[in-house]
Image (tube, rainbow, N blue to C red):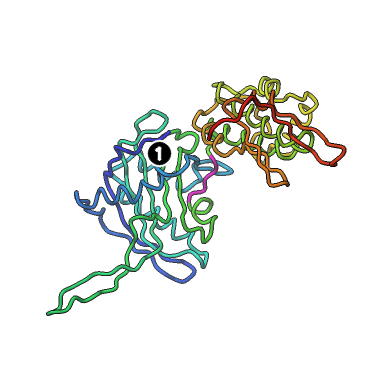
Amino acid sequence: MINLYNTHIETLSIHRVGNKSRNESVFLSGEPYALNDEIVPLLKEFFLKPFRDKEENYYQFAHEVDLDYNDMYKYASEIFEHPENVHEVSKKITQHLYEQSGHPHIKNGEVYVAYLTHLSIDNQKVDAVGIFKSEIQTDFLQFSERGSQLEMILQQGINLNKLDKGCLIFNHKKDEGYKILTVDSNRYDARYWLEHFLSVDAFEDENFMTKKYLKFCQNFAKDVVFPAEDKKEEVMFMNRSVNYFAKNDQFEETNFLNEVLDNPDLVPEFKSYKVDKGPKFSIEDVTTFPIANAAVSDARKSIKNVINLDTNIQIKLDFINPESAEKFVEKGWDEEKQMYYYLVYFNKEQKS
């Protein structure tokens, strides 16, 4: 979890980067920007709001040979070791971004490199490097009095309500490539920011593993449990899965399967499906890991508890009291109508 409430912008460097394929140049400012009390709150909101509103999917710098060959990892380390040199390093970062700006769809724009303090991540206070880019200019009107007439002046500028691209590099978990959050609102070339500029992979912590394993379970429920059983059992399998994650601090696969799979015949199916589909979710060799409670809460919101029938009827199962669905909902086959049915037991109808 992160806390950006007390974040302070220590220094800010602003440069401009063009599109290399169009022979646009780079403009590097000679000095850091002189911050003042009027603009700092606006910049903090501009830079940080997208990260407060965003799901915390962390990344880390990566390289197939060694982290020291990752340019951005080196620049971030240089800044954290010598914060007084942040402006000079910001020029290297901007030049590196320019070298990756060869795709014709990539827009020119301003690059902001900020040294940030008083952030909190994983209950630790840390510093961070923020790298942001504004690409899209919007029209706005200025007004001036000319004699007895009020004149409109059409100008263009940056909308402070929308950050186009940005990343926060936390001085945390350096040996693993730092923990990084990133946003990209304008995906003209989705690989440009994450792969070419930052060169990052997903940070495989407990948050990552919890989300990935539950997503894998959703796919197993849809592809295996539903065809083998029915929609009710698919929904209930996912409910039991989420409940297992919610009540345990540590995931252990054998205990998980014993608890959530009512049909023992599906256990070998699960293991076979994991061999086939596990690599897609980065869980092929995973049998135990710490559980992230925040990730469980996010997953619960995305799991559907409704059975949709082709007769335009919906049956909504209660995840708070799942035993009700097990005891009071039955599925059967009507020979006369040649149709399936759900039989629902109850004592009385509740008021809405």
Measuring from the top left, give residue 39's x and y in whole percent: 23, 52
| Relative to 181, residue 263 above or below | above
Q: Which of the 4 image quadrants contains residue 284?
A: top right
Q: Is residue 45 left or right of residue 248?
A: left
Q: Is residue 339 left or right of residue 158?
A: right
Q: Residue furthest left?
A: 147
Q: Which of the 4 image quadrants contains residue 254?
A: top right
Most common secondary structure along the magenta stretch: strand
Boundaries of the magenta span? 198-202
Measuring from the top left, give residue 2's x and y in whole percent: 40, 35
Residue labelled with disc 1 = 170
Measuring from the top left, give residue 302's x and y in whole percent: 57, 39
Q: Is residue 65 left or right of residue 75?
A: right
Amino acid, disc 1: Phe
Measuring from the top left, give residue 103's x and y in whole percent: 52, 64
Label 1: few (<14), some (14–19) or many (≥20) C-alpha neighbours in 10 Å: many
Tally of marks: 1
Residue at left offset 77%, top offset 28%: 266
Residue at left offset 51%, top offset 68%: 104
